[in-house]
Image: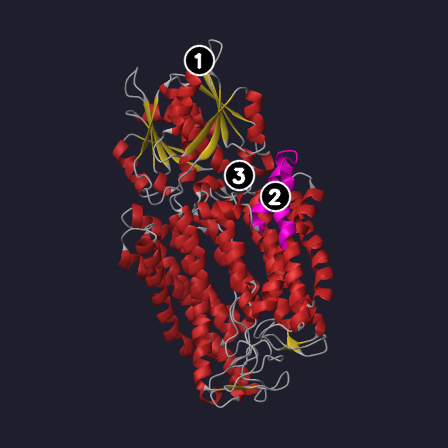
Amino acid sequence: MEPPTPVPPAGGPPPGRTGSSTASTAPGPPGAPRVEDRKTRIGRYVALFAMPFLMVTMMYATYVGTMHAPAPQDMPVAVVGSGQTAEEVVSALDSLPGGPLEPRLVATVDEALDLLEDREVSGAFEIPAGGRDEAVIHTASAGGASQASTVQQYLAPVAAENQWRITAEDAAPLPDGDMSGTAVLFAGMGMMLAGYVPLSVLTMSLPFLLALRRFVPLLIGWAAVTSTLIWTVLGPVVGAVDGHYLQFLGVGMLTVGAVGMTQMLFTKLVGPLAVLFGMLLWVVFGMPASNLALSLHSMPGFFQFLHGVLPLPAAGEALRSLLYFDGRGAGGHLLPLVFWIVVAFALALLKERRSGTAIPAAPDVSDVSTPLPALAGGPVRSPKVRYFAAVAFPLAILIGVVGAMSASMHQPKIHDLPVVVVAADAGQAERMAEGLKPRLGDMLDIRTGTSVDEVKDQILEQEVVGAYVLPTTADGGATLYSSSAAGASQQTALRAVFQQVAAGQETPLELTDIKPLTSDDTQGSNSMYVGMSWIMAGFLIMAVLRGGAPELTRLRHFVVKLAGWAVGISVWLWFLFDVLIGAVNGHALELIGFGALTVFCVSLVTGVFTRTFGLAAIIPVMLVLMLAGVPASGGGLSVYMVPDLFRTLQDVLPLPAAVDTVRSLVYFDGHGIGRNLLTICIWGAAGLVLQFLVDLWLARREKKAPGARPDAGGSGTSGGSGAEAFGAEAPGASDAAGSSASASGSAKKDEDLEPVPAI
């Protein structure tokens, strides 16, 4: 099972200026309007559209490029035995096409298990000895569930070729509370976000706290609080972790400290642009290199190098060692975190001594008395509100990502999986179904049928997951029909269930995949990543415009630009995924068209909330559109293996509609696209109607308060560049009061600037 990818923090460069004032913008005291000429305004708009383009491209180019068809390379395995047979097995494994395994011969089982628990090998193959005909495959699912599964796939055929019976033993099983093995993944993600996100808010609202003498003690306290919070969510609340608080606290403080200190260094060097450097290291490179979602041995060599360098892999592997392997090897994984802290602190100290505490493109203030906005593009706020925002925003993101993802995916449990029992006689099928219900009634939604062709059509139409066809003769075998293209995780679960059923009946079982995954989508994750890229491109553009160009957010101003963005980014994403990466083949017009519609409709809905509630609205929008949408989509884990709530949301949310559309186009001849199109259009129509209502409401507010600033969220060269909820920086944050460009000559041409209430 492949966990979903976290939504990265977002942000961008300050539109209007990137450092000190220039001839194109006339600076003034905090809160004073600044003049922006036409050339500068155009540059600001270009920068704002460039930011979501770069962020979506970086994230999904890397994820799709590394995860659409992962194949193991030189995965280390131990072969236990001696003599000619053992040497022949090693030779056979070493000569497998593509070089997936790197076998080594060891003398004893204890030696192999030590290597396995030290994670120096991914599995061990114990050759039969002493007259036995049983081979044992040893794995450690706590070291990576996908890795353990891969080892078995390659070792089992060798045993079959030698006519050995196979026994599988798990040397380090996952606990019942974390059957998916994702607790360390979500913990590492949370620690990374806790170190990354706060710097964006601090840069705009409380920049004086970024002086080392203030920042270091705050970072220590913040690391302790957030590490405790992550443990609380994963432990007592969700139940994925049992105890180990001190281990979480120690790893968390080092991880949050490493990411936070390094992100602070980036901020001191490049100001708001630090968000791009952070996103690239912590999110884009960190996940493929982490060994937490897919085996590291299936990643390109560059990511295998980064595995020993970046904080996310270090945090995840250290937690694995402490939780599941009695701390073996934990010290080696903690060293990179210490290295990041020490080096980042030393370089930041050197930077301060040479050029002071000023942050490029940030407000030049030395204490809390200077009026500043609390959030990007917002009005000036009191110190209490700004302190609250600096804490509340990162915590909201942390709880949302770790809580929502772990609660939905930490303990996948099969329930109500629709399956048809097929027999030549209806009575025989009914009797078989009744016999299965006492044992499998909660797991399966068992139906009956008499036509194999009909149930195959139902599988292709995704009405059922599989069909168990009973033998037609006394000595015949049963057949299980399923489709990996409809969901690899649910097919694996279905096969495991009916292999046990057939074994209990002493009936041979033939497994038939009537619609298999392609060689360009071996994990079945392409549809999820393509759909996520559309959703992210949709809501991110409105967050960026709300923070950096609120004068464009009125419907008649941005609808044409938004349509152009939707079409342009959809064309680019198809070109990226198909032509450049080769993960999604064909269906260009359909994918571009549906992608553009999805981006456009999601943007309309997002704009309603960002215009009325400010950038604070990005948090609930992200929770609904992305975090709830991932488990409801069935893209990573089957909807029949997550809580029932997400099966209901599957027919409501845009991300499941987008994911199902990609899957249907690529594998199922477009079946069900009409239903998905209706879902997206309903969201878009609701967003369009609400946008008109927001226009009217804001116009009425403007008339009632003629002396109010044209847009409470800032404009012109003030405001924020992106989704604050993802760590967006505040472009032009030196406009301490979030001043509007309506005071400038260029802004006078934009007569429709509206006052927007901001949080």
| Marks 2/1: CA–CA distance | 40 Å
Tag 3 residue? 180
Work out whether 266 lies above or below 377.
Answer: above
Q: Secondary structure at mark 1?
A: loop
Q: Which residue is mark 1?
A: 133
Q: Is residue 594 depicted above or below 604 in this figure?
A: above
Residue 269 painted magenta = no
Q: Earlier in the sequence, mark 1 or mark 3?
A: 1
Measured Cα–Cα span from mark 1 to mark 3:
32 Å
User: Residue 160, how many percent across, how many down?
Assistant: 38, 20
Q: Quadrant of residue 638?
A: top left
- Report the mark closest to the observer, 1 or 3: 1
Closer to us: mark 2 or mark 1?
2
Residue 168 appears in the figure: yes
Query: Residue sitting at 55 percent across and 19 percent down?
Result: 108
Q: Quadrant of residue 398?
A: bottom right
Q: Amino acid at mark 2?
A: His
Whether 198 is drawn above or below 509: the answer is below
Q: Which mark is residue 333?
A: 2
Which stretch is magenta? Answer: 311-340
Given residues 288 and 348, the one toward you in this image is 348
The percent position of residue 628, horizontal first and vertical second, equals 50, 53
**Residue 444 appears at what percent x and percent y?**
44, 34
For the rendered model, the colour scheme is: secondary structure
Q: Residue at x 69, y 40 (%)?
A: 244
Amino acid type for the residue under numbered disc 3: Ser
- Taking the magenta stretch, the answer to whether it contains residue 332 is yes
Residue 310 point in image, percent of width and height: 56, 50
